[in-house]
């Protein structure tokens, strides 16, 4: 399960407390395929040596480490995790990248499936290249307006679930929070995007923002293997209305939650509340 905006934002906030101000002495890479830019691992390591982590940001589902001269763009994919350890601590299995700090601590990246990616760009150029180049607006920023969402939905034949999963349309939403926002807006996931009324779009726009804000405040959802970089589980899963609740009673009407495949993804919905 890929961490979505609330989970990545939680990791960002945690890393902000743990690594900002630390200086990188060296970097160990045990799985070179994870490094996507520069092409050579040695160049990746060289670009980070001696750099201080100045700031942590997030763009969609990507973490961005801002250092003195470069920006490190990291995607956790399905099971990637960061943790800060003492250099003397045993290295856990599936640890693929270690950032060694001058203070004797280390930032270690573990990834059972090895799907995570890292890119280093010259600072200021990270938004000009893939993977960040084609991303849509952030849900919490001014670009994501009701008019913007209306314009996008009215122009496509795709079902609304597929449209909302598209990161070039809107960043940060994945399977969990699309299902939750659609339920809260009372919209069936298989509705054609262009069929939504202005009133429905207004409600959907607000529910996307509200759902994500609530999830961020509660540290995201812990589904399967996700925990933040200090090992703490997200608590929003206790508030989920439909996701992972197949055959359980709807919290609104009592109808059993159903699961089907929409946009190629397992999709949870209430057949009564989302006609």
Image (cartoon, rainbow, N blue to C red):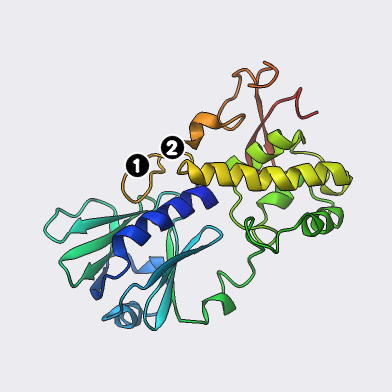
User: Residue 50 at x, y = what percent?
Assistant: 26, 81
Q: Name the residue under label 2.
A: 224
Name the outermost residue toward the left: 88
User: Residue 44 at x, y = what percent?
Assistant: 35, 78
Q: Mark 1 points at which residue?
A: 232
Q: What element carries label 1?
A: loop
Vertical placement of 207 versus 29: above or below? above
- Mark 2 or 1 closer to N-term? 2
Residue at (38% x, 48% y) in the render:
228
- Camera-side residue of 55 and 197: 55
Q: Is residue 62 left or right of residue 258?
A: left
Question: How far separated are the C-alphas under marks 2 and 1?
Answer: 13 Å
Residue at (81% x, 58% y) in the render:
147
Residue at (11% x, 58% y) in the render:
88
> Of discs 2 and 1, which sits in the foreground?
1
Q: Residues within 10 Å of mark 2 (few under 14, many from 20)?
A: few
Q: In this view, does 206 lie to the left or right of 173?
A: right
Vertical placement of 242 versus 60: above or below? above
User: Residue 21 at x, y = what percent?
Assistant: 29, 70
In this orientation, does residue 4 appear? no
User: Residue 54 at x, y = what percent?
Assistant: 36, 73
Query: What numbered label is drawn on residue 192?
Result: none
Tally the marks.
2
Residue at (85% x, 42% y) in the render:
199
Vertical placement of 208 versus 270: above or below? below
Q: Is mark 2 on a helix, strand or loop?
A: loop
């Amino acid at each position: 399960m890929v961490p979505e905006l609330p989970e990545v934002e939680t990791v960002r906030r945690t890393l902000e407390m743990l690594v900002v101000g630390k200086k990188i002495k060296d970097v160990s890479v045990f799985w070179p395929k994870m490094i996507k830019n520069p092409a050579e691992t040695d160049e990746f390591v060289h670009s980070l040596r001696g750099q201080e982590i100045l700031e942590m940001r997030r763009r969609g589902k990507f973490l961005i480490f801002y250092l003195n001269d470069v920006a490190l763009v990291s995607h956790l994919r399905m099971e990637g995790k960061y943790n800060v350890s003492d250099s003397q601590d045993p290295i856990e299995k599936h640890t693929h990248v270690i950032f060694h700090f001058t203070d004797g601590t280390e930032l270690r990246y573990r990834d059972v499936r090895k799907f995570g990616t890292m890119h280093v760009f010259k600072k200021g150029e990270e938004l000009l290249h893939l993977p960040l180049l084609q991303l849509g607006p952030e849900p919490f920023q001014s670009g994501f307006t009701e008019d913007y969402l209306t314009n996008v939905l009215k122009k496509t034949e795709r079902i609304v679930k597929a449209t909302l999963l598209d990161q070039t349309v809107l960043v940060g939403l994945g399977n969990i929070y699309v299902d939750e926002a659609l339920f809260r807006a009372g919209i069936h996931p298989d509705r054609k995007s262009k069929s939504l009324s202005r009133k429905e779009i207004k409600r959907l726009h607000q529910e996307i923002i509200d759902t994500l804000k609530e999830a961020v405040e509660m540290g995201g959802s812990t589904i399967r293997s996700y925990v933040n970089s200090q090992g703490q589980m997200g608590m929003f899963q206790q508030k989920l209305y439909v996701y992972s609740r197949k055959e359980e009673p709807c919290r609104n009407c009592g109808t059993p939650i159903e699961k089907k495949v929409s946009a190629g993804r397992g999709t949870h919905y209430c057949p009564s509340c989302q006609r």
